[in-house]
Amino acid sequence: MFELKQVKYQDIIDIKELIIERNKVTCIIGESGSGKSTLIKLLNKLISCDCGEIYYNSKSLNELDSVELRRSVIMLPQTPAIFPGSIKENLLIGLKFAEKPLAEDEKLSSALQFVKLKKGLAEDADKLSGGEKQRLALARVILMEPEVFLLDEPSSALDEETEQLIIEAIVQYCRLNKKTLIMVTHSKKIAKTFAERTIELRNGKVLAEREE
Amino acid sequence: MIDLQFSQLITAYVFILLLLFIVRVRGISREKEILISTLRMTIQLILTGYILVYLFEHISPFFTVLVIAIMELFAIFNIYKRTKVKLSYALKKIIAISMLLGTLSSLIYFLLIVINISPWYDPRYFIPIAGMMIGNSMTGISLGVDRLVDGMKTQKQLVEAALMLGATSKAAAKQIADNAFDASILPTINSMVGTGIVFLPGMMTGQILAGISPITAIEYQIAILLGILGSVALTVIIFVHFGYKTFFNKESQLIIEDSSNPVL
């Protein structure tokens, strides 16, 4: 699905070759500063590499339109982005941005149920706790039905239980719907529990790759 | 009309003496600023007076265009200086283009269609009206620039999140651009609401003092207020429309200058 060849970005990423497979849960692990978050930002062209090539479905990212790419390779950032407005508005905003048909309330509520967020659609999104905001952001991207999810490890402000819950929900969704999940985490335990494949980075280079 | 004598004008400076006395008594250290600003105002206006007299006596398209060019240049550099935020080269270029396009097109429409002056370069109309339009557009765009740059910085996370959700750069920056437009035109709209009740605009007051019928003065004032609003709105809409684009590259990636690692 993704293929990286001789990719360099500033002095943060220096990857000779790397393949990330379709329909699998891939974990990217490594110490902080090893380039994990930068790597996934390269995959949806939130940033572009200085040299080398990245291929998505055998097409070079240089040939793909950034906005179109981000509509099928969606990234969930470390800190959830909550836009001013209600929970419903926050759920719909992703579909609006991606110019996709808007979902009915029933579908929105079931997305909330899926991420175990027991809140009404009309409630103010800004009043949610950190963990709840993270789950709302997850429900939002699930509604968008992308091909690939890029998940930057949920912010360290979350307790372990909430983090586990969020990751479990997205892994379950991806397995059920045959989606690709690429997840950054510092925790080897999380990688062991969920990953089918683990890529370990150190100083921007691939240190090890293994099937779990 | 009463022609002010030099001695009469001098008596008006009593207000400054009064102000200086008050700040001295209250221990507010503003004497220097008050004196400098009074001096600047006096010298600038005297010079302007003589220049205008010269221009009105030597009517020429060259002089009129030169004055407008100086006004535009001064206004543009004043915007660069007045904005509280650091401006990128691309944004400075957009500011200059918006000011020129917005004010000049409104000015030409206003003078040639609304007032219908002849010859087209008559400095008696051209210069004061250009001054009002350029001055107000300058204030408006300054507010817009501050709001846009500040918004892009403080809400960088939301803009980036929108891009991650597949938004075009236009959609990602829409809220911030709309706020900038709103902040720019609001003072002009508010001043229209208060006009005639809370205060009498300077141009109208000046015409009335000069002996013109209040009805004529009001007609001019209404026209000029509409012209100013048009000029501010046009300038700001051009600025906002192109200004937000300077924060993105062609790959719809956020680029915010003067931050060492904007995307990490």
Image: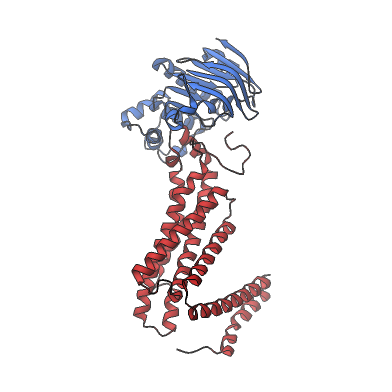
Q: Which chain is red?
A: B
B171 to the left or right of B254: left
Q: Which chain is blue?
A: A
Q: Residue at x 40, y 74 (%)?
A: B119
Q: x%, y% of residue B15?
A: 59, 81
The answer to whether residue A164 is seen in the rendering is no
Q: Residue at x 52, y 38 (%)?
A: B254
Q: Is residue B48 above or below residue A47?
A: below
Q: Nearer the viewer, residue A32 or B88?
A: B88
Q: x%, y% of residue A38?
A: 58, 28
Residue A37 position by quadrant:
top right
A32 to the left or right of B92: right
Name the colour scheme. by chain
> How many marks are shown on the rendered structure?
0
Q: Nearer the viewer, residue A136 or A23?
A: A23
Q: x%, y% of residue B54?
A: 53, 79
Q: Nearer the viewer, residue B43 or A160?
A: B43
Q: Is residue A141 above or below residue B62?
A: above
Q: Residue at x 35, y 25 (%)?
A: A110
The answer to whether residue B3 is seen in the rendering is yes
Residue B199 position by quadrant:
bottom left
Q: x%, y% of residue B121?
A: 43, 72
Q: Is residue A163 above or below residue B91?
A: above
Q: Residue at x 51, y 54 (%)?
A: B95
Q: Quadrant of the C terminus of chain A?
A: top right
- Give the residue at the far top of this rendering: A211
